[in-house]
Image: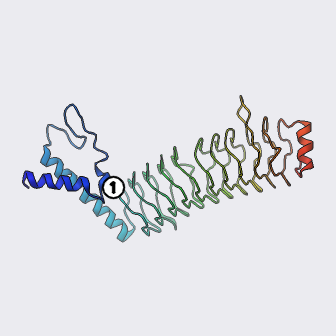
Amino acid sequence: MSYVKKSLVAAAIIVSVEFIPIVSGIQPNYVYGESDLAEPADMGFGDTVESLEADVSGRQSDKEKLISTRQCPGCDLRDVNLAGADLRSAELGGTNLSGAILEDVDLSAGSNLGNVNLTAANLKNVNLTDAIMDGANLTNADLTGANLTRVDLTNVNISGTNFTGAKLPHANLSNTNLRGLDFHGADLSGADLTGADLSNCNLKGATLSGAKLLRALLFGSDLSNTTLYHADLQDVNLVAPDSSVTQSSFNLDGANLSGANLKGADLSKASVKGTILKDAKDLTAEQKADLQKRGAIVN
């Protein structure tokens, strides 16, 4: 291939709409003008172009294979656009989908995403109902509006993941570090959050009806307009050891807060009809009387 032709190929690769992100992993060395794609002593410009061409070709081949067969374990699908694809029951174990666009993709019906790299992936409105995600990496992924019904996330890296408006009914998040994550408007009905660290989370407007929150940490979280109807919050900790937190204007009807640590918690505006507060810690006599008057069960 001539130098001019290779130059044109390189330019085409860089501006390609389908594969714009392929160059995102190249970190140029501005001192030496080198690339991470190869050792500079062994690779010239033409070799670099051919390497990029092979990379593009490989990813395109993997993408076509996945769409046609729904089978692509261990494939390289970094930054590819799969928006809207029907990938129900897909086999993707160990695949690299970092930075990929998976918006509105259907990965339900037991799709295998075990050990998949989804770092910084766009997963808006993706359907992951009953998907297998053991060992997956969702660091900084966007799961806004995603459906994760019955998904086990206990062995998944979800650092920096956005769950705004996500659907997580009956999902397993027990003993998981969820600190500081955004669950604004999320549906966590019936989810298992036993022992989970939800401190400093945004749970504004979230639904936690029937959720298991035994021994969960909730201090510093925004629970405004949160529904915890019939949620089990036994021994939940709503406050940090060295500070107080105001939790008012949210629904605790029918919730079980037996043994909960309520030190500094303001429940004066919360709906507490049928709320069980037996053995709740650090409630004053005045608070107990007020809560009982408003329908709470206090011993």
Between 29 and 256, the residue placed more toward the observer is: 29
Between 232 and 72, the residue placed more toward the observer is: 232
Instruction: Where is residue 197? Give x, y as percent.
Output: 64, 42
Work out which quarter of the rendered image holds the C terminus and state it: top right
Q: Secondary structure at mark 1?
A: loop
Q: How many marks?
A: 1
Instruction: Where is residue 231? Give x, y as percent.
Output: 75, 53
Between 231 and 3, the residue placed more toward the observer is: 3
What's the residue type where badge 1 is placed? Asp
250 to the left or right of 138: right
Residue farthest toward the top in the current orientation of the protein: 242
Instruction: Where is residue 139? Give x, y as percent.
Output: 48, 46
Instruction: Where is residue 260? Give x, y as percent.
Output: 78, 42
Residue farthest toward the left in the current orientation of the protein: 2
Crowd tier of the residue under label 1, counting other residues whose Cα lies within 10 Å: few below 14, some 14–19, many 20 or above:
many
Residue at 22 percent across and 40 percent down: it is 35
Quarter where residue 240 is shown? top right
The image shows residue 296, relative to residue 104, as above or below, that is above
Colouring? rainbow
Residue at 24 percent across and 52 percent down: it is 14
150 to the left or right of 286: left
Residue under pointer 1: 76
Q: Quick check: can you spot residue 43?
A: yes
Work out which quarter of the rendered image holds the N terminus and state it: bottom left
Residue at 51 percent across and 46 percent down: it is 157
The image shows residue 15, relative to residue 71, as above or below, that is above
Residue at 89 percent across and 52 percent down: it is 295
Q: Quick check: can you spot residue 299?
A: no
72 to the left or right of 168: left
